[in-house]
Image (cartoon, grey):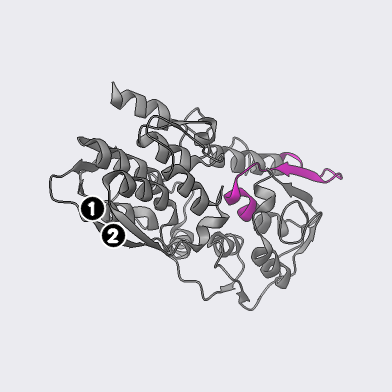
Amino acid sequence: MHGDPLLEVSCATPDDVRILRDALVRIEQTVGEKVPLILDLGNDGTAVRFLTAYTAFLPGRQIVLTGSARMRQRPIAPLVNALRKAGAQIRYMENPDSLPISVSGVSLPQNLPPIDVDGTLSTQFVSALLLAGVPVRTATQSPYIDLTRTMIARYTPLLPVEADWASAAFWYEYVALHGGALLLEGLKEDSLQADKAVASVFGRMGVDTQFTQDGCAVCRTDRPLPSFLQIDFASCPDVYPAAAMTCSRLGISLEATGTERLAYKESDRLQSVAALLRTPRGGVAQTFDDHRIAMAALAADLRIDNSQCIHKSYPLFLEQLCNIRV
């Protein structure tokens, strides 16, 4: 990065984007300084994984990455182990497998053989290595990894940023529970995002999707609802909170598979969603400081104990939700 920052920060910028952007700016601003740079990345798992790989190959830089209490509980060893195989110098400062870590930047070796990496806990371990230019070999199959490879191949400085299908899940939830129709702007039928599966998931709950030039129109139908659904969330785990809340409210029994990664999200979402589903109507839902738990609760007309956590991914969600309720 040189000159003006590439990303403009506004009130609509998610915290995850702002934290990563600010960290990159700080790294650039402190080139040449002798003291270690300490970056507190809060609860931004994406920033932690991508910056661990990025800073590992900044020769001569000494950078400490830390984060929130929850972030310091989330595992990072598969990424660190793979980076070490590529020559990175990374030291755990407190507990193995978690932040804080101290990264001593080195040059990325030339002609590296493919590095084995386990992406079971997070596909972002694989994506972080790919973005850093490390050749990767992994048994993990994921549309998120496919998306990373595709976007690297397509990269140009003016590459447009799509609307987020994972955030759309809560509008699908709202329509499923309240009826009516919404136009979700910027969502593309040919999107490579794995969370586009939200359209088919909620299609099984009576919500139809029609793509337009501006995005997609979402509406609830009057077709009979099933009494039981089995849904595999392995490729779209972020859809789970909205889908589980919707099934619960509609009286649909849900058998969810592919949920292993949910335990390592901003909260343990298996436990957080279970607590959310126990919240009585009109009650206050505990969010566990998890943005997707908060939005799943709000879309179902529950009050929440923390609205600030929504800023992590969708700062305008609550305002937009209030507007459509008017």
Residue holding disc 2: 229
Question: How busy is the neighbourhood of tag 2: few (under 14 within 10 Å), some, or many (20 plus)?
Answer: some
Q: Nearer the viewer, residue 204 or 161?
A: 204
Q: Secondary structure at mark 2?
A: strand
Q: Quadrant of residue 21?
A: top right
Name the residue at 65% across, 41% down: 42
179 left or right of 41 in image: left
Q: Is residue 281 shown above or below 157?
A: above
Q: Is residue 38 magenta?
A: yes
| Residue 77 horizontal/vertical position (percent) | 68, 64
Badge 2 or badge 1: first in the primary sequence: 1
Q: Nearer the viewer, residue 28 or 257?
A: 257
| Residue 238 horizontal/vertical position (percent) | 44, 52
Question: How busy is the neighbourhood of tag 1: few (under 14 within 10 Å), some, or many (20 plus)?
Answer: some
- Nearer the camera: disc 2 or disc 1: 2
Name the residue at 73% across, 49% down: 65
Magenta residues span 29-50
Q: Quadrant of residue 126?
A: bottom right
